[in-house]
Image (cartoon, rainbow, N blue to C red):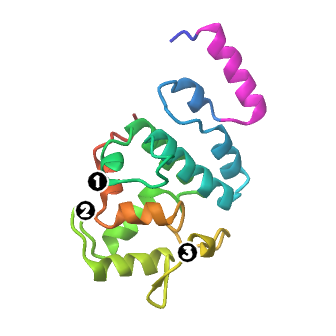
Amino acid sequence: RKFPVKVIISSVIAAIAGISLWIYLKPDLIGNYNQLEKYLKTQDWQKANQETIDIMLKVTKQDSKGFLDTNSIKNFPCKDLVHLNQLWQDYSQGKFGFRAQKSKYEETGNTIGRYNENTFNKFGENAGWQQQGVWISDLELDFSNEALPGHLPSSTILRDALRKGELFSRMNNCPPNT
């Protein structure tokens, strides 16, 4: 496969800057992932978490509302969702990301498409989002390397989209190599 000179030059610049070539070879991504990848690469989990939320809001055009509704999750662009998850998985060695969260969601008895308060609370506890029966605030998230698997990315707006597994349902409908 031949690449245009522009792509080759961009790839060289990206390699020098330590940015994934995947971004340059996937021009149909809606979000800009350069800053997120830098934060993940340096394991600045707090900034990466906030950047992820910002990207998700921008990609779904919900940044003015500040939350992700069911419709925005159902229509989340597959390439962007898969890419977000892949970046988190790659830079955390599989500890963080939506797939890690989905595993915990299912392990705690949750079923995609159905909300059950007891099993969702168990999921919250296992992800470290709930302590002694109380959901923690975004300010209380654990941004250390000792955080529980599946703890990140997280935000109150993301947790709301996970109650009935809408985000996981969308992931199931996205081919892994989009």
Seen in the picture, residue 12 relative to 170 is either above or below; the reply is above
Query: Which numbered circle lies on residue 137?
Result: 3
What span is colored magenta in the figure?
Answer: 4-19
Q: CA distance from mark 3 to mark 1?
A: 25 Å
Q: Earlier in the sequence, mark 2 or mark 1?
A: 2
Q: Amino acid at mark 2?
A: Ile
Could you tell me which secondary element the residue under label 3 belongs to? loop
Which sits earlier in the primary sequence, circle 3 or circle 1?
3
Q: Examine the image and state in which quarter residue 55 appears.
A: top right
The reply, left or right, for residue 8 in relation to residue 54 is right
Extreme-bottom residue of the structure: 132
What secondary structure is marked by label 1? helix
Q: Is residue 159 left or right of residue 20?
A: left
Residue receiving disc 1? 169
Which residue is labeled 2 in the image? 112
Q: Residue at x 43, y 42 (%)?
A: 60
Q: Position of residue 18 (x, y in %)?
A: 73, 36
Name which residue lies at 53% across and 60% down: 153
Residue 22 is covered by the magenta coloring: no
Amino acid at pointer 3: Ser
Q: Are marks 2 and 1 in contact (CB under 8 Å)?
A: yes
Label 2 – label 1 distance at C-alpha? 6 Å
